[in-house]
Amino acid sequence: MDRYVVFGNPIGHSKSPLIHRMFAEQTGEQLDYSTLLAPLEDFTGCAREFFLQGRGANVTVPFKEEAYRLANSLTQRAERAGAVNTLSKLADGTLLGDNTDGAGLVRDLTVNAGLSLQGKRILLLGAGGAVRGALEPLLAERPASLIIANRTVEKAERLAELFDDLGPVSASGFDWLREPVDVIINATSASLSGDVPPIAGSLIEPGKTFCYDMMYAKEPTAFCRWASEQGASVAMDGLGMLVEQAAEAFFLWRGVRPESAPVLAELRRQLA
Ligand code: ATR
């Protein structure tokens, strides 16, 4: 049977095996998908050994940059992201690196939530790997503007420069912004510690501004709670992004697009 894994460290709590098994069952694809704990000091060796037999892999924290360097060729979006979350063994035995995180985010926003991003003013909070992966797919939706705001402003400035050939992207500090925007996407890891990036409540226009947190939890995240308190029209968490990035990877490997809605519903049920 074709073997797939998700590499990470730690990896014990990954939902990817469950998601891909549900995709396989749904599409009738014969495959085996499991977790693989790679040693922190030797991801490359571990991956090379796996790919003697394995067909494909997802890659998560902290190995996405190493996977980028390991890949023999890259998709354009992975090249731009500077990180790889999906590896695929090609017919000639070489490894193709892709990054499906940003596409998963955009699909969750546009398909699952039915939000058009075209002409919208988007504010992205954070300037780490998650933001870098999201920039090309977000700019491809042709927003009116995309502001990257970060605690360390220089990191936001560097990203804005790196992507400014793709659309109207700019950088900011958290406390420089006052005017309402249409969409706010939290891609900081602040939610992990129950924090909310210190942005003005006036950025949310009650009943209009759509808020999204790339993190998810059983309960609404700190950012989603804050957004709801400010009157956001929607405050949505990132569980759908997780399922959609997996669906993109599955499609790349198998050429079949699984249906994400029943899988998302099952994950939500299990979380609760
Ligand atoms: P990821 O790959 O998930 O993006 P990362 O590259 O470590 O992770 O980036 C984490 C992001 O969350 C950064 O933008 C970080 O801000 P700095 O660049 O200033 O470090 C942001 N971040 C983490 N904790 C935060 C907090 N408590 N408040 C605001 N931003 C925070």
Image: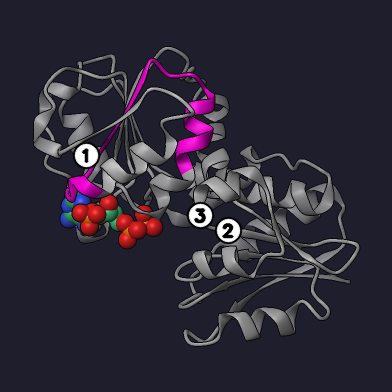
The answer to whether mark 2 is within 8 Å of ligand 1 is no
State ligand 1's quadrant: bottom left
Say what secondary structure mark 2 lies in: loop
Q: Which mark is residue 82?
A: 3
Q: Is residue 98 magenta?
A: no
Mark 3 within 8 Å of ligand 1, using the beta carbon: no
Q: Which mark is residue 196?
A: none
- Give the residue at x 22% y 47%: 154
Colour scheme in use: one colour
Q: Could you say which quadrant of the image residue 179 lies in? A: top left
Q: Is 54 above or below relative to 98?
A: below
Residue at 72%, 64% in the rendered image: 72
Residue range of the region highlighted in magenta in the rendering: 134-154
Choose mark 1 or mark 3, whichever is in front: 3
| Label 2, label 3: how far apart the Cα atoms are | 7 Å
CB at disc 1 and ligand 1 closer than 8 Å: no
Q: Which amino acid does the dot numbered 2 rest on?
A: Val
| Residue kind at label 3, given as amino acid type | Gly
Label for residue 225?
1
Q: Nearer the viewer, residue 19 or 59?
A: 59
First in sequence, mark 1 or 3: give its number: 3
* Of the two numbered discs 2 and 3 in the rendering, the one whose residue sits closer to the viewer: 3
Q: In the rendered picture of this protein, how many numbered marks are placed on residues?
A: 3
148 within the magenta span = yes
Q: Mark 1 or 2 closer to N-term?
A: 2
Q: Decide if residue 138 is in sight here.
A: yes
Q: Dot 1 lies on which element?
A: helix
State the residue position of label 2: 84
Query: How much space separates mark 1 and mark 3, taking CA atoms?
Result: 32 Å
In this rendering, position of residue 214 left or right of residue 206 = right
Secondary structure category for the residue under label 3? loop
Label 1 sits on what residue type?
Arg
